[in-house]
Amino acid sequence: MRYAAPAALAAMLVVLVAGCGGPQHVSPADGVVSAPTASSPADVTSPSPSASRTPESLPTSRRPSGPPSEPTDNDKTAGWIVGTITAGGTGPCYGLVTDEGVAYALHSTAGIRLDKGTRVRIKGTPAKIRINCGPGRLLEVTAAEPLR
C-alpha cells in the first residue's frame, strides 16, 4: 500500500503529459489519427477555418416566410372590436363573438350593462390578471359602445 499512492500519481502524470502533446491529425477518409511529422512547433501549420469547412457543414438559418399572423407582444393594445354579446349582464365577465367568429372573454370592473344579443363595439387591452370569464381570448374592457 505504501507504494500504491506514488505509483498512481506517476500514472496520472504520464496520462496528463501524453494528453498535452502536440496536435494530432485525423484523416476524414478513414478516421485514422496520426501524429504530426514536424519537428518543431513553428513548423506545424493548422488548416485555415475556411479550408476545413465546406458549405454543407456550415449552419444555416431559414428566412421567415413572412410576418407573424398573431401579435407577438402581449402588451399591445387590442383596439376596437365589433361583435355580438353572447354572455351579458352587469359584469364583471361577458362573452362576445365577432363577425369573423372569434370568441372573446371580456372582463370589466366598471359594472357596464351589456345585454345578450346586443351588437357592440368594444375597446380593450390584454388582461393583466388571469380570470376565468368563459371561452375565448381574455380581454380587459376599457370602453364599450352599443351599435344601432
Image (cartoon, rainbow, N blue to C red):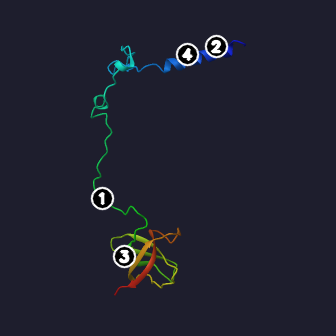
Q: Which residue is mark 4?
A: 14
Judged left or right of residue 16, residue 70 is left
Q: Which residue is mark 1?
A: 67
Kindly identify the residue that appears in the image at 31 percent across and 29 percent down.
Answer: 48
Judged left or right of residue 145, residue 67 is left
Q: CA distance from mark 4 to mark 3?
A: 76 Å
Mark nearer the viewer, 1 or 3:
1
Disc 1, SS: loop
Query: In terms of sequence position, does the residue under pointer 3 or pointer 2 come before the other?
Result: 2
Which amino acid, mark 1? Pro
Residue 143, above or below 132: below
Q: Nearer the viewer, residue 7 or 104?
A: 7
Mark nearer the viewer, 2 or 1:
2
Query: In terms of sequence position, does the residue under pointer 4 or pointer 3 come before the other?
Result: 4
Q: CA distance from mark 2 to mark 1?
A: 66 Å
Other-residue count near label 1 (Cα within 10 Å), few / some / many at <14 / 14–19 / ≥20:
few
Which amino acid, mark 4? Val
Q: Which residue is mark 2?
A: 7
Query: In terms of sequence position, does the residue under pointer 1 or pointer 4 come before the other?
Result: 4
Other-residue count near label 2 (Cα within 10 Å), few / some / many at <14 / 14–19 / ≥20:
few
Instruction: Report x, y in % for residue 19.
Output: 49, 20
Q: CA distance from mark 2 to mark 4?
A: 11 Å
Disc 4, SS: helix
Q: Which residue is mark 3?
A: 81
Which amino acid, mark 2? Ala
